[in-house]
Amino acid sequence: MAGFKLSRDQLASFLKDHQQIKQFERLFDTVSDAVTVDPATVDDGDYLYYDGTTLTWVAEAPGALTRVDDTNITLTIGGTPATALLKDVSLTLGWDGVLAVDRGGTGADNAADARINLGITAGAVSTATLNFGAFPGSNEASVTFADTGVIAGSNIQAWFAADSTTADHTAADHRYAPLFISLACLPTAGVGGTIYARSEHKMQGQWAVKYSWS
């Protein structure tokens, strides 16, 4: 017969008195009919233990259920965890995987991807050059930039800085360029992006344009 462990309270639920307990013990006593432990001396906290060969009463203090919290995860154990178990048990909480943005996380396991997912500028502001060409110029111009971190849903922003200059245009020209030139951007996943410029008037020469993406 396989071993088992039974508390005195559990045993008492179907063995109503000490005499019945003694008779129950004899069923498992493979040495003799003698009972080595007087059930009358058994405390309520003791357990009847049968290892497959010998039946004994064992005094065993209650064990505690404890927990080890993670930095961002805590567990509250209700009831009476200090004496809830036969043996001490500890729950160690940890973090697995990434928490999606719609659940309050970043959806990433690194800072660069987290900034992208949260719509935060991913890097330093860069400069590109738009060239409308020599006289008589053109109504449209475009420039591409390389950045393998760009994804299909990246947001690219481009603008004329008030202090930018080129060989063809002064800072004052750049300061008022938005009055004549409109900018639009298109990301290319894993490659970078394209900045498009258009004007109702024919523009000439090179213009510096600032950009960043998130």
Image: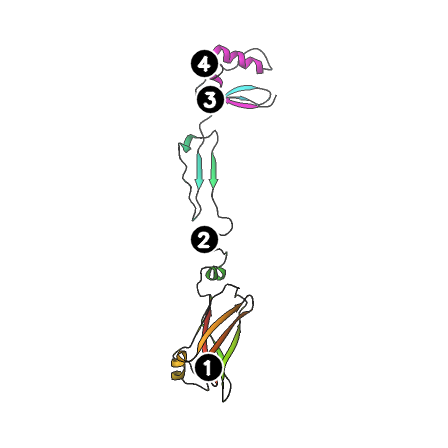
Q: Residue 34 at x, y = what percent?
A: 55, 11
User: Which residue position holds label 2?
Assistant: 102
Rendered residue at 44%/76% (across/down): 182
Q: Secondary structure at mark 2?
A: helix
Labelled pair 3, 1 in contact (Cβ < 8 Å): no
Q: Which residues are magenta?
A: 1-28
Q: CA gap, disc 3 to disc 1?
A: 88 Å
x, y percentage for residue 139? 48, 82
Residue 154 position, x and y percent, is: 49, 65
Residue furthest out toward the front: 200
The label number, if any, that marks residue 46 in the structure image? 3
Label 4: few (<14), some (14–19) or many (≥20) C-alpha neighbours in 10 Å: few
Relative to 204, is 15 above or below?
A: above
Q: Residue beneath label 4, please? A: 40
- 4 or 2: tag closer to the N-terminus: 4
Number of residues whose C-alpha sits closer than 10 Å to that of mark 2, classed few (under 14), some (14–19) or many (20 or more): few
Quarter of image, res 42: top left
Residue 204 magenta-highlighted: no
- Spatial CA distance of label 1 from label 2 is 40 Å
